[in-house]
């Protein structure tokens, strides 16, 4: 039986200093579960959502900065194209990119870009009004791929694969035209976990989303500065900021969307097991090739290390 707390809980006082010099503290618990044996598995705790707007902003900014430093996402002289869909994640991404631009010693430029795909009823003026007053340069790219997707879509297939391929090509071309060397996307921690499950269950690959990806053209680099941020924090932030959210009607009308199903599964897992999603993020940063089955990653004919006896799982 798993036991949490007592001697198995290590508390760390973490100092979070904001850019204005003010300081706040939070207690982080690193849990270990007693598995009735000598093994101790460290499992991260579910991150609490601060209710105070200033504390929440500091917390998200801390995770944004940590991901940026871990993966060298932002460097001096970068020109970053921030992709704006009109959803909560893209609004949050632009805000924290602007915050980093203001407070970071690294100097870089930001331009917000929205791709108008011609979705019927999309309130483009709502997003453009926001971007006009956002404080950053922006551009609306008109390329009505909606009609192409609906024309080419095979019966029973979802729109997402073709839609994303078309969108990706247009955004890459736009970044080159604007002189941007980085393309920032608003994917968060929960997107990483859902992608991991999608690839695991439906694609036969152990693959998620990288925080930094050099495109095949060798020119563009895709970055995901919100990689460490739980979706619930972005939901709360969007509510506090009262962003004019615009849903993707093309996606929401698809009843058999596997990503939505994975999100529902993850939400249920998170309710049942508070440490599951933080552990999933930790897992994709802590890969053990010799305990998988990929012969291209690990030479199973090589002599095993002395620790194998202790680390192996007999299940």
Image: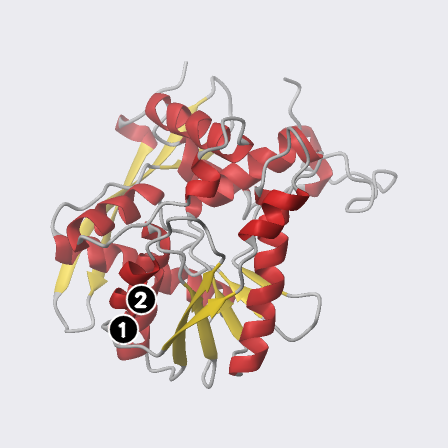
Residue 187 in sight here: yes
Residue at the image position 64 percent from the left and 33 percent from the top: 157
Q: Considering only vertical position in the picture, is 107 above or below 49? A: below
**Residue toward you, 16 or 169:** 169
The residue beneath circle 1 is: 132
x then y, percent, for residue 29: 29, 40
Residue at the image position 14 percent from the left and 63 percent from the top: 23
Residue furthest toward the right?
301
Residue 105 falls left or right of residue 26: right
Q: Are marks 2 and 1 in contact (CB under 8 Å)?
A: yes
Write down the quadrant of residue 293 in the picture.
top right
The residue beneath circle 2 is: 128
x then y, percent, for residue 83: 44, 64
Residue 39 falls left or right of residue 33: right
Residue 229 falls left or right of residue 198: left
Write down the quadrant of residue 25 in the picture.
bottom left
Q: Residues within 10 Å of mark 2 (few under 14, many from 20)?
A: some
Write down the quadrant of residue 96 in the picture.
bottom left
Q: Residues within 10 Å of mark 1 (few under 14, many from 20)?
A: few
């Amino acid at each position: 039986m798993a036991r949490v707390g007592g001697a198995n809980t290590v508390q760390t006082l973490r100092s979070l200093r904001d850019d204005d010099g003010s300081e706040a503290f939070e207690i982080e618990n690193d849990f270990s579960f007693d598995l009735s044996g000598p093994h101790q598995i460290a499992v991260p705790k579910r991150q609490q959502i601060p209710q105070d707007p200033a504390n929440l902003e500091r917390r998200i900014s801390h995770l944004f900065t940590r991901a940026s430093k871990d993966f060298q996402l932002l460097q001096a002289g970068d020109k970053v194209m921030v992709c704006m869909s009109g959803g909560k994640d893209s609004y949050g991404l632009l805000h924290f990119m602007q915050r980093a631009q203001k407070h970071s010693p690294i100097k870089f430029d930001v331009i917000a870009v929205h791709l108008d795909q011609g979705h019927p009823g999309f309130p483009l003026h709502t997003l453009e009004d926001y971007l006009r007053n956002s404080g950053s340069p922006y551009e609306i790219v008109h390329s009505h791929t909606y009609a192409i997707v609906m024309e080419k879509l095979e019966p029973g297939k979802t729109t997402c694969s073709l839609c994303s391929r078309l969108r990706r090509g247009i955004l890459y071309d736009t970044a080159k035209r604007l002189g941007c060397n980085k393309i920032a996307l608003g994917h968060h921690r929960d997107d990483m976990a859902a992608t991991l499950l999608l690839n695991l269950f439906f694609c036969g690959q152990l693959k998620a989303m990288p925080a930094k990806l050099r495109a095949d053209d060798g020119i563009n680099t895709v970055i995901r500065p919100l990689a460490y941020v739980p979706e619930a924090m972005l939901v709360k932030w969007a509510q506090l900021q009262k962003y004019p959210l615009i849903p993707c009607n093309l996606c929401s009308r698809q009843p058999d969307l596997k990503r939505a199903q994975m999100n529902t599964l993850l939400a249920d897992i998170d309710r049942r097991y508070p440490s599951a999603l933080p552990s999933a993020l930790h897992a994709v940063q802590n890969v053990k090739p010799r305990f998988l089955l990929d012969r291209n990653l690990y030479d199973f004919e090589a002599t095993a290390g002395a620790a194998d006896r202790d680390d192996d799982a007999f299940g």
